Image (tube, rainbow, N blue to C red):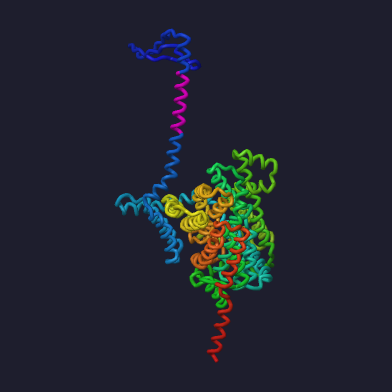
Amino acid sequence: MCLVYDVVYGYPIAYLTLSESAQGFFVMMDSPPKISLVKIKNLRRSKMKRRGLILLLSLMIIFLLGNVGFAEEVDSAQLNAVKFGFWTLLPPIVAIVLAFITKNVILSLFLGVFSGTFLLNLSGSNVFMALFNGFLAIVDKILDSLADKWDAGIILQCLVIGGLIALVSKMGGAKAIAESLAKKAKSPKSAQIFTWILGIIVFFDDYANSLIVGPIMRPVTDKMKVSREKLSFIIDATAAPIAGIALISTWIGYEISLIKEGYISIGQNVNAYGVFVSTIPYRFYNILILIFIVCTAVFLREFGPMLKAERRARYEGKVVSERGSVVVSEENKELEPKEGIKLSVWNAIIPIGVLILGSLFGFYYNGYNSIMGGEDMALIELLKSHPISFAAIRETFGASDASVVLFQGALFASIVAIIMGISQKIFTLSEAIDTWIKGMNSLVITGVILLLAWSLSGVIKELGTAKFLVSVLSDTIPKFLLPSIIFILAAVISFATGTSYGTMGILMPLTIPLAHAISPEASYVIMSAGAVLTGATFGDHCSPISDTTILSSMGAGCDHIDHVNTQIIYSASVGLIAVLFGYIPAGLGVPIYIVLPIAIAAIVGTVYFVGKPVEENEIESNSTKDVMNL
């Protein structure tokens, strides 16, 4: 027997009784007991309370279940960091050390990923099953990387830009622009300066910088006997460093979002873009590395492995090393322009210009659609009222998907190049497609390296490597040392993981509250936030497993290990100056307008006094040989 209640008022209106007969079961309905109005009101109240309690319990269960799922996702890395401890560093150490020992980046990355999947599958003492399951997990990690829309877009853009460069080369555009620049770049000095300027011009994205500047400037620097190692260093040092501080770029949206969330965590609603602009003077590494390039080019002084590479190129005529020549010396003769073709710089300027302008327009259009399809009414109103204002362009660039946009831009530029080549009767449609595919084939190896690097990054994230480093290195910190320690910590994590974005995402939520707790001064918090952003760039710039490092070596046609070996000394030197002459004085309260010029002077002095003239040694050597011959 049960009561049937009124759905509105909540009092009983009938009895339902289940009875049995020869024909089966049936329901009988009886009149309910008489209830007074007071009882009805009491029943109504109790019913409403019951409903409210059920609703409250439901919400709590949903909330707890949601938090349990989120906690499992977030804390799994933390649990692994506690479980494995120092062993969380094994994958990046294996990858980095083997890269230097074996000189084979693919094998090193593969074994780095395998060491991580082995640890994740290590259960008790069953080592053999961990090895077996770890090997199988490598495939899953690679497939996960390839399935990610961003990663797939990066690989596609690399391949398509490779095809575009091949078309430009086949049309004679690359050779024409190289000859044109060679007329102005009449020395190794001017060749390096022109490369630096072109790197600054392609400021809006680090990937685009790496893939555009290298193929264009390679013939020029080769003719001027500038080593591929130096070319790849200039490309790499003008990729992420300039994109990270550009007022409009594909980086800015991510950086601003991290800053905004960090300030919200301390209860402050700030103009995140204004804070970002305020961090630029404190982005010492980004600024100093750009100046370092100019100094080495102007003074023609080098030190460390780069000095050896430059002297080899200048006096032996070998722009690539013996190891590197195996990889890059065999330029594809099929991509050389046909004999008798009239060379025109427009065959390079127009397709590359379409890529750059198309990408800029694509960043706006993609970001515009993303914002308009979102729920931020303030941004939507901004785009409606002032669609081409600086703020609107800044927000749309930040909200765009760079991997998709660059892929679209490269594809459109390739179509333009094919049409141009066919109209000039340089090649047929079939030949154009064959050339485009050959160009993509040249960058397949880049795709393999990127997939392994991303897989390694995924393993490192799952193991909690970054969380372990943070827990070990972030103890009680003196006020004046906090920015320096944050910079170093960001560099270590970024170097070990090969990602600046991931490092920023890990440290920024920790840095702003910590800096504010130590000192609520606005400039101090801004400086600490800037240390996260530039430290992540520094570590990523040095790391042999970083995607931008890989793309820079590929774009320059330089052996990847040669690029890393020669670049790391320069990057470390600039990073050390950034700490000693930048963050420590600034942390002690020295005004930025004093700190920055002193840090720049330290860069100039280092290049001039530590560096050795590239040409002087050969002149002395030749003089010695002449004397001995006499």
- Using the image, determine if residue 562 lies above or below residue 286: below
Q: Is residue 467 left or right of residue 254?
A: left
Q: Quadrant of the N terminus?
A: top left
> Where in the figure is residue 23, as x and y percent of width and height?
35, 12
Front-most of 262 and 48?
Answer: 262
Q: Quadrant of the C terminus?
A: bottom right
Query: In percent of the image, x 68 and y 40: which residue is there?
Result: 384
Q: Is residue 15 left or right of residue 582?
A: left
> Where in the figure is residue 130, as x and y percent of width and height?
34, 52
Look at the image and tell me whether residue 214 can be seen. Answer: no
Residue sticking out furthest to the bottom: 630
- Using the image, determine if residue 290 lies above or below residue 408: below
Report if residue 59 lies within the magenta region.
yes
Query: In percent of the image, x 49 and y 56: which residue is there?
Result: 485
Q: Is residue 489 left or right of residue 212?
A: left
> Where in the figure is residue 370, as x and y percent of width and height?
60, 43
Report if residue 98 lies within the magenta region.
no
> Picture quarter containing residue 217?
bottom right
Total labels drawn:
0
Residue sticking out furthest to the left: 125
Front-most of 30 and 82?
Answer: 82
Report the predominant secondary structure element of the magenta stretch. helix
> Picture quarter containing residue 228?
bottom right
- Using the image, determine if residue 250 lies above or below residue 25: below
> Where in the figure is residue 323, as x and y percent of width and height?
48, 70
In the image, which residues are magenta?
Answer: 46-62
Look at the image and tell me whether residue 213 can be seen. Answer: yes
- Using the image, determine if residue 267 lies above or below residue 570: above
